[in-house]
Amino acid sequence: MADKNMNLAQFYAKFMEEVNLAADSQTIGWAKEDFFTAVALEYLADTGEIDDAIMCPYRDRGLQLNAYCVSDDYETVEIYVSIFSDLIDIQSVAKTEVDAALKRALSLFRKATNDLHTSFEKDTDTHGFSITLSKHKKDIKNLKVVALANGTVKPVPLKNIELDGTDVSFSIWDIDRIFRCVTSGKMRETVEVDFVEMFGRAVPCIENTNSETYSVYLAILDGAMLALLYETHGARLLERNVRSFLQVKGAVNKGIRDTLKDEPEMFLAYNNGISVTAENVEIIRDENGRPSIKQIRDMQIVNGGQTTASIYNAKRDKKLDVDLTRIFVQMKLSVIQSPEAMDDIVPRISAYANTQNKVQIADFSANDPFHRKMEELSRTIWAPAQSGLKPKNWFYERARGQYADHLSRETTTLRKKQFKEDHPCFTKADLAKYENTWDQLPYFVSEGAQKNFRKFTLRLQDRKNFLPDELYYKRLIAKAVLFRRTEKLVQEQNYGGYRANIVTYTIAFLSFKSAQRIDLEKIWKEQSLSESLEREIVKVSSIVHRLITNPPGGANIGEWCKKEKCWDTIRDYGFEISDSFENELISVTRPDYVLSANAQSRGITEVTVAEAELIEKVSEIPASVWFALSRWSKETGNFEGWQRSIVFSVGTLIGRGKKPSYKQAAQVWPVYSQAVKKGFSG
């Protein structure tokens, strides 16, 4: 997060430092403009303006594409084009430059929906983009063309147009707009709604202003108003956590759809409405003193996002033919008086509100205890020094801009270079990428940084109150070394496209085939990979490349990589790891316990048939396997200590010729099943 006291010039210098850092850390053949695009898109993701855009640099005569995003239903396409100047000071961008960039993007869209894909090899990113648009051109209803600029652009009136049945809108994110958004403290643009200006009337309400902390207003909106609000402001109207987990699709929720179609007059009775928070509200009163809401500043829907989006989609669905003015929705508006209280109160409102579609809230804050502890560990733990090299201290960037701040304190070019060598940087998104890849969830990683991070956060929540320790940190850095070296090895193979997908699937495959027995401690100590492991990575990456670029039925490669079926296909591919690699893996074998000749099975009473069957299944697995599983879990960092302890206890019982209780069997069977899924074979 940027310092609120920072001026535009200081922010620009910091922003460009991030661009330079990105360029220094990558070896993927991008131009400086592309690294600017990547950093700008990260900022837009932080603001909630976008979710996960796909980098896809392409420029030809009269055509330009830097990145894109296609909605799951193919109805909305976003094309990003960059206007970049690699100069120390902020430059003014002429209107002609903006017009030319937007025109190149439109030309690209036209060509992509026709025959652009014929110009590219099948396994390239540009082919994936253009073939998607060509196949689904009839589905595309909205095109959003976004110009990104690291200069300043004077306000330009941008008129929406229609292009062959597609509604086209334009927007510009210049460095000044990004700066204002970041330093607002919200990391998103404030949504201001003036009901009188927008609808010609204020909204009558009931008010309760007894609390010094907040005020509450109850009001009724009709469906047409709510649909227009969403159409105007889109996902920015939805509070970040709601938007993150809702993943609103184009389809109308079935229950809401049925009510809208069959019983519109009952919608208010059946639906729980929406919960809204705001920074400020303007109330006007009639001659009798009765209040109405004229204006809401920073309107955010924290619950009821599905209701809002479904009503909006119903408006667009001509088959429904619903008169939304007959639909009424309750709105509870909470105005938080203190900006400092927003971060504390809003998540609670979102979590506690009784909504029709309950939303599970995850804390994405950089102040989460897990991330604070990670930062603490990263500042104090140094990797062992290698022969002739200085030790490294990996820098965990808990909040955006921390690394650039530290780097700016180095006064010379040489000192900056040395700092970057001594302190490799990794972010929260990187951490999630390393962990989900190692845990064999490459289809999560393939969804993009934002979605993958959300899913990692949900997985983290399952380990209640988990905090990283020194061992966790060292293993994580080993995974970072593994991931980054794999990126370079894959890049050297010149596969053409889909590098990110190939990397995550390659590591996940090796994680599975080795049952996560790759020696992370050795990687941590040496800060490098063995020759044997590197050879294995190259071999596997070739297989992965071939498999993901030939999806069944000619499916879109990028979309195929996001599916668990893609992982199942790759995971089940017949491949034997080399002897040299096998010899480097951690050994988790343990001598069998000597069984007593007089050992007798313990009697089992008062259990159901299903419970007895589970006990038998667990008992049929040899004690040596349970001991190996206990050690494997410890060596690989899988499962909690109490789970490993129960696994060991069950092994001891079986080794003595006894059977576990149903409770013990019920606890160890899921552990065994998950371990097998990750490649454990005993």
Image: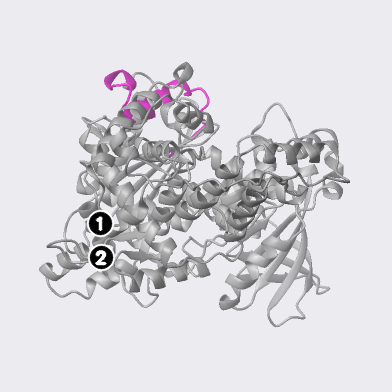
Discs 1, 2 touching: Cβ within 8 Å: yes
Q: Nearer the viewer, residue 30 or 452?
A: 452
Q: Is residue 483 left or right of residue 252?
A: left
Furthest-right residue in view? Answer: 606
Residue at point 73% right, 37% down? 616
Estimate the x, y position of residue 603 in percent, counting from the top left: 82, 45
Estimate the x, y position of residue 622 in percent, counting from the top left: 60, 40
Note whether residue 248 is visible: no
Q: Is residue 137 shown in magenta?
A: yes
Estimate the x, y position of residue 418 in percent, counting from the top left: 16, 66
Q: Earlier in the sequence, mark 1 or mark 2?
A: 2
Q: Nearer the viewer, residue 24 or 381?
A: 381
Density class for disc 1 (Cα within 10 Å; few <14, some 14-19, many ≥20) is some
Estimate the x, y position of residue 529 in percent, counting from the top left: 26, 48
Q: Is residue 643 shown in magenta?
A: no
The amino acid sitting under disc 1 is Glu
Locate the N terminus by quadrant. Answer: bottom left
Q: CA distance from mark 1 to mark 2?
A: 7 Å
The amino acid sitting under disc 2 is Pro
SS for callout 1: helix
Q: Is residue 327 left or right of residue 434?
A: right
The image's mark for residue 384 is 2
Per the rendered image, the range of residues in magenta is: 117-144
Residue 515 sits above or below residue 481 on the image: above
Residue at point 57% right, 48% down? 593
Residue at point 46% right, 71% down? 372
SS for callout 2: loop
Note whether residue 626 is visible: yes
The residue identified by callout 1 is 526
